[in-house]
Image (spheres, helix red, strand yellow):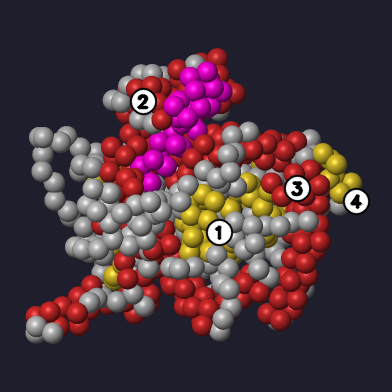
């Protein structure tokens, strides 16, 4: 088992808990006082691309992460001449081929193209309470930057204020809040995506959304995710709420309607209940049956009026992966998100998360292989997003290259949530009257924040970038968590631009699989990405031999 380093002396970062491949702690806390790389980048922005204490230090790499098979065992190729994929109006002169001129804009979709300013999107932020608590920062941050955000499953089903009669929603205040918060600052880049599982289908979420918001929303069908192989879960600590969820049709464990369970709850032997979603397609027994069901579901959504539809699949085996790519392509879907094991969660059985499914790099490598087979047959392959334990700019580059030309976005869950926590905590500490409303966790700024400053203008490197775009007056309406989201996105974008410039690729569609190579032979075998010294070895020998 690979153990990821807990601290980085060059950047001055340290993980509070056990680090993952992404650089995030295994358990990411909303009240965290720092300071992993993503947390610190939400304040420092692109400054965190470089070693600290310039002028007093020199720095050297201690990278040993090319051991084993993971995204960190891929390395990024660079070239010493040329410039490819130049944006319109850019010449290949040394004065113009500079990394700030690299375009990170991307678009995906079939007939209707959805644009994003950076090639990333959020994971599904659904019925877990942490998603609801910090939604304003999540959604406004996504809209300000211009990347898609996903409203996850079960948002309507767990909402006590929602009204559902005969599978028809007449009122869904929490879902409305989620959608309308994003649309408030939406400027044509990014998207609001509403995910739908078994319960959402039964509750008529698709019909409600299209009736109220029309083509402003992308509808996403859900097959699974990388963190677990059963439906979504949340945990509730109220007996009355647990009974409400049971009556709404959910699986609640333990059963809150049983007298002995109620007695155990009253005696405090049971302190919480787990609400589970149902598995899909349990009545089907072949991939042909799944295909028919899936195509019928897509046809129904088209009939309702949906112009943009996506699919999210989890880290199932090769059959399910092939089904998702083939069926999504045949149905002319706009996006397929493939979430490998290593993906995060708001709640999942822990040992299930640790032991089930296909690791991200293996799943994504096979996704490229299967997509290529379809493309050779003349099929227009669905645009894809790769997900599962990705957080940093180098991982974004590697995922895009591994899946090129089919991969348009990298889906990041926990990494894009961290700025919202940080911003809410900072704003709550500086404005105690807002703390409860913002779900802030700090009474005062910790030293890890005060190292940067004591006002939002000092703390967030991108504060004035946001102010320039929206004006000083509007800044009072923008939560600090959204400013932190912009700041993190600015670091990821700048880091990605630098990597792309080094690879001589100046736009997203110019990235190919030749921009990465494998750091060991096992990774070469599993991904099809050649080993470092094999890449262009024939060209090198021709040069040496004078040919």
Instruction: Kindly identify the residue that appears in the image at 68 percent across and 70 percent down.
Output: 331
Which residue does the numbered mark 2 point to in the structure image?
459
**179 versus 278 height, above or below:** above
Sequence-first disc among 4 and 3? 4
- Where residue 519 sits: x, y (%)? 26, 69
Determine the CA span between mark 1 and mark 3.
19 Å
Instruction: Kindly identify the residue that appears in the image at 46 percent across and 51 percent down.
Output: 105
Circle 1 — which element?
A: strand
Which residue does the numbered mark 1 point to in the structure image?
108
Question: Which image quadrant for residue 111?
Answer: bottom right
What is the crowding at mark 4: few (fewer than 14 residues within 10 Å), some, or many (at least 20)?
Answer: few
Sequence-first disc among 2 and 3? 3
Circle nearer the viewer, 2 or 3: 3
Instruction: Kindly identify the residue that appears in the image at 58 percent across and 39 percent down.
Output: 187
Circle nearer the viewer, 2 or 1: 1
Relative to 203, is 152 on the left or the right? left
What is the crowding at mark 2: few (fewer than 14 residues within 10 Å), some, or many (at least 20)?
Answer: many
Determine the CA span between mark 2 and mark 1.
35 Å
| Residue 254 seen | no
Question: Which image quadrant for residue 318?
Answer: bottom right
Relative to 402, is 123 on the left or the right? right
Determine the CA span between mark 2 and mark 3.
39 Å
What is the crowding at mark 1: few (fewer than 14 residues within 10 Å), some, or many (at least 20)?
Answer: many
Is residue 483 rendered magenta in the image? yes
What is the crowding at mark 3: few (fewer than 14 residues within 10 Å), some, or many (at least 20)?
Answer: some
Is residue 358 rendered magenta in the image? no
Q: Which residues are magenta?
A: 466-493
Circle 3 — which element?
A: helix
Which residue does the numbered mark 3 point to in the structure image?
214
């Amino acid at each position: 088992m690979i153990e990821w380093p807990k601290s980085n002396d060059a950047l001055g970062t340290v993980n509070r808990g056990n680090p993952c491949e992404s650089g995030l702690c295994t358990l990411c806390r909303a009240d965290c006082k720092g300071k992993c790389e993503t947390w610190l980048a939400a304040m420092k922005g692109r400054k965190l691309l470089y070693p600290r204490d310039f002028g007093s230090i020199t720095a050297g790499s201690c990278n040993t992460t090319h051991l084993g098979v993971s995204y960190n065992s891929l390395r990024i190729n660079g070239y010493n001449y040329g410039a490819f994929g130049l944006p319109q109006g850019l010449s290949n002169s040394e004065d113009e081929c500079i990394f700030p001129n690299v375009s990170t804009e991307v678009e995906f979709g079939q007939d209707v193209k959805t644009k994003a300013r950076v090639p990333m999107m959020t994971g599904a932020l659904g019925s877990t309470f942490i998603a609801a608590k910090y939604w304003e920062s999540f959604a406004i941050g996504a809209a300000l930057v211009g990347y898609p955000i996903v409203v996850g499953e079960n948002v309507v089903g767990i909402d006590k204020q929602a009204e559902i009669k005969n599978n028809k929603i007449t009122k869904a205040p929490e879902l409305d809040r989620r959608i309308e918060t994003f649309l408030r600052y939406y400027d044509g880049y990014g998207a609001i995506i509403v995910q739908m599982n078994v319960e959402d289908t039964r509750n008529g979420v698709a019909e409600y959304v299209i009736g109220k918001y029309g083509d402003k929303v992308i509808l996403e069908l859900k097959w699974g995710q990388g963190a677990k192989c059963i439906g979504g879960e949340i945990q509730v600590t109220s007996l009355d709420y647990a009974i409400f969820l049971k009556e709404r049709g959910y699986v609640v464990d333990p059963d809150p309607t049983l007298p002995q369970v109620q007695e155990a709850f009253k005696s405090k032997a049971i302190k919480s209940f787990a609400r589970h979603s149902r598995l899909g397609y349990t009545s089907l027994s072949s991939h042909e049956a799944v295909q028919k069901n899936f195509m019928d579901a897509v046809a129904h959504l088209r009939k309702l009026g949906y112009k943009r539809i996506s699919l999210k699949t989890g880290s199932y085996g090769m059959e399910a992966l092939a089904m998702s790519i083939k069926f999504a392509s045949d149905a002319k879907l706009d996006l397929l998100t493939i979430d490998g094991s290593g993906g995060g969660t708001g709640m999942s059985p822990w040992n299930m998360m640790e032991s089930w499914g296909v690791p991200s790099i293996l799943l994504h490598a096979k996704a490229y292989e299967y997509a290529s087979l379809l493309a050779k047959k003349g099929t227009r392959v669905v645009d894809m997003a790769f997900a599962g334990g990705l957080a940093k700019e180098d991982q974004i580059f590697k995922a895009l290259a591994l899946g090129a030309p089919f991969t348009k976005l990298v889906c990041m869950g926990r990494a894009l949530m961290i700025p919202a926590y940080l911003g809410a905590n900072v704003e709550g500490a500086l404005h105690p009257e807002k703390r409860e409303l913002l779900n802030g966790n700090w009474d005062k700024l910790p030293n890890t924040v005060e190292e940067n400053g004591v006002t939002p203008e000092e703390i967030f490197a991108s504060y004035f970038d946001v102010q320039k775009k929206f004006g000083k007056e509007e800044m009072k309406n923008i939560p600090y968590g959204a400013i932190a989201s912009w700041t993190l996105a600015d670091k990821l974008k700048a880091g990605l631009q630098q990597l792309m410039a080094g690879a001589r690729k100046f736009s997203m569609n110019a990235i190919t699989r030749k921009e990465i190579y494998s750091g060991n032979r096992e990774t070469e075998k599993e991904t099809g990405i050649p080993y470092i010294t094999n890449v262009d070895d024939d060209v090198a020998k021709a040069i040496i031999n004078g040919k």
